[in-house]
Image (tube, helix red, strand yellow):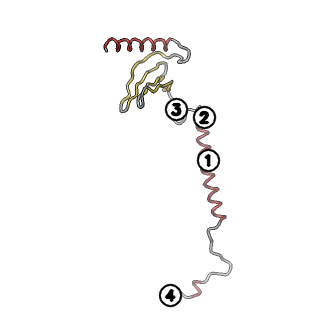
């Protein structure tokens, strides 16, 4: 057993308690950290041109088309080439490669793709 003088505290010291001041301080510190994270993500997106994280490079998604619940066709631009890619569960396959063009202008690349698609569909109709 300890003597009572060891257990007694000096008259001027108080035991720190967890009060509203400490709760407010912790909440403000957490809010500051979260705000800094959002600010950093926003700055990174602005500096990266809105492409998100790791969006720099020669690869760009031009467009896509859902052809079923889990199947789609996408048009990917790699440097000066477009690659038509078919995506199904468990498989990704390059369907066609054509020169780069403007998808909204109906340029040479789009005409070439339209002709290719027409030939493929005609062949499929002849076989079936």
Q: Which residue is mark 3?
A: 55
Whichever of labels 1 and 4 marks the residue nearer the N terminus, that label is: 4
Task: Determine whether, in the image, residue 62 is placed left or right of residue 29.
Answer: left
Q: Residues within 10 Å of mark 4 (few under 14, many from 20)?
A: few
Q: Quadrant of residue 49?
A: top right
Location of residue 7 with respect to 29 vertically, above or below: below
Rendering coords of residue 53 (x, y %): 53, 36
Whichever of labels 3 and 2 marks the residue nearer the N terminus, that label is: 2
Give residue 47's mark: 2
Q: Residues within 10 Å of mark 1 (few under 14, many from 20)?
A: few
Secondary structure at numbered mark 3:
loop
Query: Do labels 2 and 1 touch, CB within 8 Å?
Result: no
Whichever of labels 1 and 3 marks the residue nearer the N terminus, that label is: 1
Q: Residues within 10 Å of mark 3 (few under 14, many from 20)?
A: few
Q: Which residue is mark 1?
A: 36
Query: Do labels 4 and 2 touch, CB within 8 Å?
Result: no
Q: CA distance from mark 1 to mark 4?
A: 52 Å
Q: Which residue is mark 4?
A: 1
Secondary structure at numbered mark 4:
loop
Q: CA distance from mark 1 to mark 3?
A: 22 Å
Q: Nearer the viewer, residue 75 or 81?
A: 75
Whichever of labels 2 and 1 marks the residue nearer the N terminus, that label is: 1
| Residue furthest to the front | 128
Secondary structure at numbered mark 1:
helix
Q: CA distance from mark 3 to mark 4?
A: 69 Å
Whichever of labels 4 and 2 marks the residue nearer the N terminus, that label is: 4
Q: Quadrant of residue 104?
A: top right
């Amino acid at each position: 057993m300890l003597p009572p003088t060891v257990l007694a505290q000096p008259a001027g010291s108080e035991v720190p308690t967890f009060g509203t001041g400490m709760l407010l301080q912790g909440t403000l510190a957490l809010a500051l950290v979260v705000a800094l994270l959002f600010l950093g993500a926003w700055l990174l997106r602005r500096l990266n041109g809105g492409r998100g994280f790791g969006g720099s490079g020669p690869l760009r998604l031009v467009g896509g088309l859902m052809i079923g619940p889990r199947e789609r066709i996408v048009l990917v631009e790699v440097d000066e080439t477009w690659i038509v890619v078919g995506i199904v569960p468990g498989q990704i396959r390059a369907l066609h490669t054509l020169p780069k063009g403007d998808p909204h202008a109906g340029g040479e690349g789009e005409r070439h793709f339209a002709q290719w698609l027409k030939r493929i569909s005609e062949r499929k109709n002849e076989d079936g």
